Amino acid sequence: MIHIDKYNVFSYGKEWKNGKEAKTSTIQKTLTSKECINGKQFLQLLRDLDDAWHHQESKDVHVEVKFVDIER
């Protein structure tokens, strides 16, 4: 089982002003944690966040994974 030591989840979107969509992307929501979570729990968290944040909007998902040496 893989353990994730810390994570950052960002949801990007465009703001609406005066009934029109802005031309630049902004961060709308973010979740950050330095607490360990296992891979299965993390995937469930992503599913739950997608349901809560996006309400079935179409969003592309981009994932970046880093494996870093343990500091001793």
Image (cartoon, helix red, strand yellow):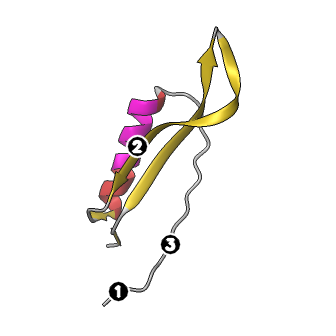
Q: Is residue 71 left or right of residue 19?
A: left
Name the residue tied to disc 3. Answer: 66
Q: Amino acid at mark 1?
A: Glu
Tag 2 or tag 1, which sits nearer the N-term? 2
Numbered disc 2: secondary structure: helix
Percent x, y of residue 8 = 43, 55
Relative to residue 16, is residue 65 depicted above or below? below
Neighbor class of circle 3 (other Cα within 10 Å; few <14, some 14-19, many 20+) is few
Label 3 to label 2, Cα distance in Å? 21 Å
Q: Which region is colored magenta?
A: 45-53
Discs 3/2, front: 3
Magenta-colored segment: predominant secondary structure: helix
The residue beneath circle 1 is 71
Rounded to the nearest angstrom, the CA distance separating label 1 from label 2 is: 31 Å
Q: Quadrant of residue 3?
A: bottom left
- Determine which residue is flagged by label 2: 47
Q: Position of residue 38 (x, y in %)?
A: 30, 64
Residue type, mark 2 in image: Arg
Foreground of the two, 15 or 55: 15
First-in-chain label (3 vs 1): 3
